[in-house]
Image (tube, rainbow, N blue to C red):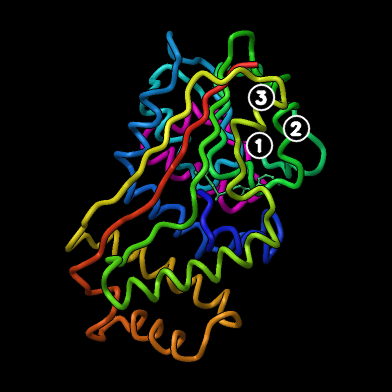
Amino acid sequence: MEHSTHDHAQHGHGHGHADDGQADVLDLDAEVLADHLASVVARLPLRPGPAEIVDLGAGTGTGTLALLDHFPDAHVTAVDASAAHLQRLVGKADRAGVGDRVRTVEADLDAAWPDLGPADLVWASASLHHVADPDLVLRRLRGVLAPGGLLAVVELAGMPRFLPDDAPAGRLEARLHAAVDRRMAEHMPHRGADWGVKLADAGYTLEDRHTLAIDEQRPGDDAVRRYATLVVRGMRDAFADDLPAEDLAALDELLDDPGPEGLARRDDLVVRTERTLWAARP
Ligand SMILES: C[S@@+](CC[C@H](N)C(=O)[O-])C[C@H]1O[C@@H](n2cnc3c(N)ncnc32)[C@H](O)[C@@H]1O
């Protein structure tokens, strides 16, 4: 998912050389937002269910596993530049007993285009803003889709936020996100793009556009605590140069696990994020 931490990790270190920390962030995102993801999959305008699915920029398998779960007759081709992510994805699929319905393709979508399709559904979640030329990828995907096939693009507004707006820590988190947004605007021009416009320009007809606004209190949820800690630590480390010393000191208190302000123990954590789905056919 787009994700400032993911974004930075991926763009800082190049495609396909993601570290385990990034994979852990993706896995925790899947765990914390599982029900919301399932609701996005469930609203895809697909009757009957798809037989062949391509998960483009599949990462550690968040979408792949949700799709296999919702469409029990489907096979998924999971495409990603990161061999480590795909390896994790296969392990998860095997443990879930659906490994025989998954094929992986390790490919950098900015390089030679892999042999994909025909697919009844192409799912691209938080991956298109990473590629160098998403407009070209959208046009190429027209050739991957089977007649009547659906392209589902899911993108996020940014990394989730975890602290209450009205607390000093929430205002600190907002300044951290603002610093990240400023820097990402320079490095990742397609982050936050209007994918409806891009899809129309690439010759697709939009069938659904839906924004899921998530704003939940999750006190005592350990996955949320771990997710918040990883995200805030990743952003703090990656963007330390952009932050004043007093904010860095306050962030370190949040990241001090046993400390009274520590994200690892707080009971006031929330999950605030937005995911938008665009579903379109050529
Ligand atoms: C933010 S993650 C999203 C993963 C997954 N779709 C999800 O929803 O959790 C973006 C993924 O795109 C992959 N990616 C980025 N640039 C890529 C490229 N040029 N070719 C192939 N995969 C790429 C990354 O390796 C990463 O797994």
Task: Decide which of tag 2 and tag 1 comes sooner along the chain.
Answer: 1
Dot 3 crowding, Cα within 10 Å, few <14, some 14–19, many 20+: some
Mark nearer the viewer, 2 or 3? 3
Q: Is residue 102 above or below residue 127?
A: above
Label 2 vs 3, first from the N-terminus: 2
The amino acid on which the numbered mark 1 sits, given as a three-letter code, is Val
In this rendering, the answer to whether 225 lies above or below 71 is below
State how far apart marks 1 and 3 are (Cα): 28 Å
User: Which residue: 53% across, 63% down?
Assistant: 5
- Residue 57 point in image, percent of width and height: 60, 41
Residue on which the image places disc 3: 200
Q: Nearer the viewer, residue 151 or 171?
A: 171
Indicate the position of residue 175 as horizontal and vertical percent values: 46, 73
Tag 2 and tag 1, C-beta contact below 8 Å: yes
Quadrant assignment, res 117: top right
Q: Residue at x 36, y 73 (%)?
A: 171
Identity of the amino acid at label 2? Pro
Disc 1: which residue = 105
SS at mark 3? helix
Give how far apart the Cα atoms at labels 2 and 1 are. 8 Å
The C terminus lies in quadrant: top right
Q: Residue under circle 2?
A: 114
Q: CA distance from mark 2 to mark 3?
A: 24 Å
Residue at x-position 28% and y-position 79%: 262
Up-down relation of residue 242 to residue 148 (above or below) = below
Closer to the chain start, of discs 1 and 3, is 1
- Direction from residue 157 to residue 242 in the image, left or right: right
In the image, residue 101 lies in the stretch drawn in magenta: yes
120 above or below 255? Answer: above
Question: What's the amino acid at mark 3?
Answer: Ala
Q: Which residues are magenta?
A: 76-105
